[in-house]
Amino acid sequence: MNDDGRRTTRMRDRAAGAAVMEQVVRLQAQAPPRSTLARALGAPPIGEDTAPWFAGALGEREVGALLDRLPEGWSVFHAIPVGTRPDASGAVSDVDHIVVGPPGVFVVDTKHHRGQRVWVGERAVLVAGQKQPYLRNSDLEASRVRGVLAQAGIAAPVTAVVALVGTREVTVRQQPRRVLVLRAEQLVRWLTRRPAVLDAATIAEIARLFDDPATWRPVDTSADTVERFAVIEREVRTAQLVRAGWVVAVALGAVAVALPVVSVLTR
């Protein structure tokens, strides 16, 4: 651990969603606190700029939990830093999940679209009718992982996967040629049904390579990121309950007001 309380761990120790959780925590620390009235009314504790990152973190954690179900002989790595330059928000690109097992290496990109309809074609993915850059981005991430393997002199197939979380409906007209798109709940079953192409020694060699922080862009992880994100998540859930309570209270109040009127009109 460094003097500032941050530490670099083995890559397998990175929590699912670590990079986006850190972004949520960073943005939330810059936001003004909610007033007492806002809390009482259940105002969302996160702003519009933070909300997409928060949803992304939830999606990656959900997929991470699913990947935990993989049997012995598989290795999973989360939030692997591959970018070199931060974007306008200060975030640097990362690979959501890398899965290593007998069928090869799988670069999994999580997309959280709660309640949305998704359409998948050979060259495009549409969410609520809007084209998304998921195929290009996922293929690029897989190419980066292929480059890491090639530099280490390891031959292994690398497959790009987009895992959809929380979607209402997924219509696959045609699977893209270079990227597989599926629902997150189908992921583990799909992975474990692939034919084996790697022996145990190669799997172990790849796992060691990916587990070494020196393989990737240097990254420091705050020791309390998961805990701080959990606090924010609890605040979001509490605010949702408060708002739901107000909706029920207003509905009951409307009924209470309407009942005497109905009684008079029916006499």
Image (cartoon, rainbow, N blue to C red):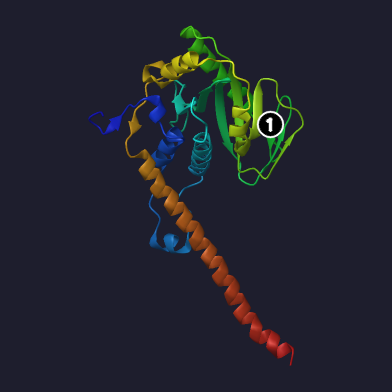
Q: Which amino acid does label 1 sit on?
A: Val
Please give the name of the residue rendered at 60% of the width and 71% of the height, measured from the top-left corner.
251
- Residue at the right extreme? 173
- Identify which residue, 194 or 180, lies in the foreground: 194
* Picture quadrant where residue 6 is located: top left
- Percent position of residue 171, x then y: 74, 37
- Percent position of residue 185, x then y: 61, 39
- Identify which residue, 122 or 98, lies in the foreground: 98
The residue indicated by pointer 1 is 125
Residue 7, relative to residue 253: is it above or below?
A: above
**With 246 as the anchor, is 193 left or right in this view?**
right
**With 167 as the anchor, is 72 left or right in this view?**
left
Please give the name of the residue rendered at 40% of the width and 36% of the height, measured from the top-left corner.
22
- Percent position of residue 191, x then y: 60, 28
Mark 1 neighbour density, 10 Å: few (under 14) some (14–19) many (20 or more): many
Q: Is residue 262 visible?
A: yes
Please give the name of the residue rendered at 58% of the width and 35% of the height, measured from the top-left corner.
111
- Percent position of residue 216, x then y: 42, 19
Element at label 1: strand
Q: In which quarter of the image is the C terminus?
A: bottom right
Please give the name of the residue rendered at 52% of the width and 25% of the height, measured from the top-left corner.
99
**With 24 as the anchor, is 178 left or right in this view?**
right
Residue 184, relative to residue 76: is it above or below?
A: below
Residue 40, relative to residue 189: is it above or below?
A: below
Q: Can residue 45 be seen in this view?
A: no
User: Across the whole image, how many numbered discs are drawn on residues?
Assistant: 1
- Identify which residue, 137 or 38, lies in the foreground: 137
- Identify which residue, 254 or 208, lies in the foreground: 208
